[in-house]
Image (cartoon, rainbow, N blue to C red):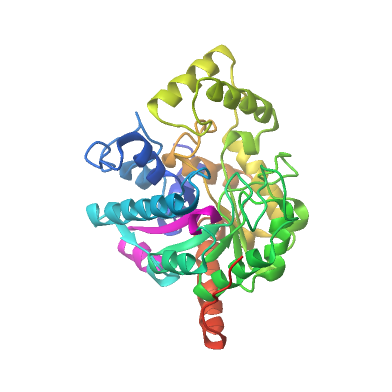
Amino acid sequence: MSSSREAARDLLARWPVVDGHNDLPWALREQVRYDLDRRDIATDQSAHLHTDLPRLRAGGVGAQFWSVYVRADYAGDKAVSATLEQIDVVRELVARYPGELRLALTADDMEAARAEGRIASLMGAEGGHSIHNSLATLRALHRLGVRYMTLTHNDTIDWADSATDEARHNGLTAFGEEVVREMNRCGMLVDLSHVSAATMRDALRVSTAPVIFSHSSARAVCDHPRNIPDDVLAQLPANGGVAMATFVPKFVLPDAVAWTQRADENMRAHGLHHLDTTEAGMAVQRAFEAAHPRPKATVATVADHLDHMREVAGVDHLGIGGDFDGTAFTPDGLADVAGYPNLIAELLDRKWSESDVAKLTWQNAVRALRAAEDVARAERGRRGPSHAVI
């Protein structure tokens, strides 16, 4: 093992990774309809998943935001009930593996899990469609343990524009701004991955708590609308927010953008959703990849994004959000959740200090959640719950 890899493992033993986004709950839904006996993550699941407990340990993961994502075409009450099912399976995982996982609702819970050697398990809802335009539903999700909500997924919704759909609102509507304020009052982090640049700027203007990007990289390095423009990165120090770099090849490697568009079209031609990572979906993807070799992102590709994001936003505002089990393809060296030491070794080789890496992996994310909790206490002291409607 190289000296930098040894140093990375030592550092992660002290300051493990807080990963901002993992889609294991959706993979469990799609693959086995939540039958955890068929996907026992205490054992090697590398034939089916990017994630299991042994590989989380090997990767030095100390806290995971599990995405309680549901597809954007799950509209209305269907989206709400499916989100509840996603929350239920996260809680089932925590109950099934109490020696490995600990439910975390606060920054103190995260630190307690680290002290115990367990993996803090948090939840993030991916897309404002999950609340069906209801602030009461938003509050209910918070009470069930959801600690961030991505304002949109891939589709523009009634109150916020998505990065990958037609803009209808020029950012947030008045109700969308009220959603942000109510998230501040609850203590739920505002997640700006997936949203349009105008929505990012509106949310930063409105939010009194730190925002996060749970899985987005730098648009200046890879010009994809899912990534963060430099002017938005530059606003994070004043806001206190954290941009968590993702590993998805089409978001980090310019050559992969056009290739992935063709792969997505091929999936749809086979009657499949382009994000389908079931065995049937992956068979179609692998056949396409065999016929059309894929441009390969690497650990260095991701590190290039982190270098740029550090230059623009500062090291106090960076994190990691791999998007494992939510993407068909991963970079070389970051094939699954065991790969984080490879990234940390690359950063150490690039002369990142241990203190800077500790901020990236653990400290920044914990600080942002703690700050959101402080804002929520102050906001609740000033006003009651909002009952605004569209």
Q: Residue at x 62, y 70 (%)?
A: 178
**Residue at coordinates 68% horizontally, 54% vertically from top-left?**
310
Corner quadrant of residue 119: bottom left
Question: Which residue shows up at 65% across the image and 51% down it?
Answer: 195
- On the image, the x and y values in percent for residue 372 come to 54, 72
The vertical placement of 172 against 326, above or below, is below
Q: Is residue 112 magenta?
A: yes
Above/below status of 343 relative to 171? above
Image coordinates of residue 201 in percent, x first then y, are 73, 60
Work out which quarter of the rendered image holds the C terminus and state it. bottom right
Please state the horizontal and vertical placement of residue 295, each as a whole percent of the image.
62, 24
Give 317 or 216, whichever is nearer the viewer. Answer: 216
* Residue 222 lies in the magenta-colored region: no
Query: Is 4 on the left or on the right of 106, as rendered?
Result: right
Magenta span of residues: 110-131
Residue 276 in the image: above or below residue 366: above
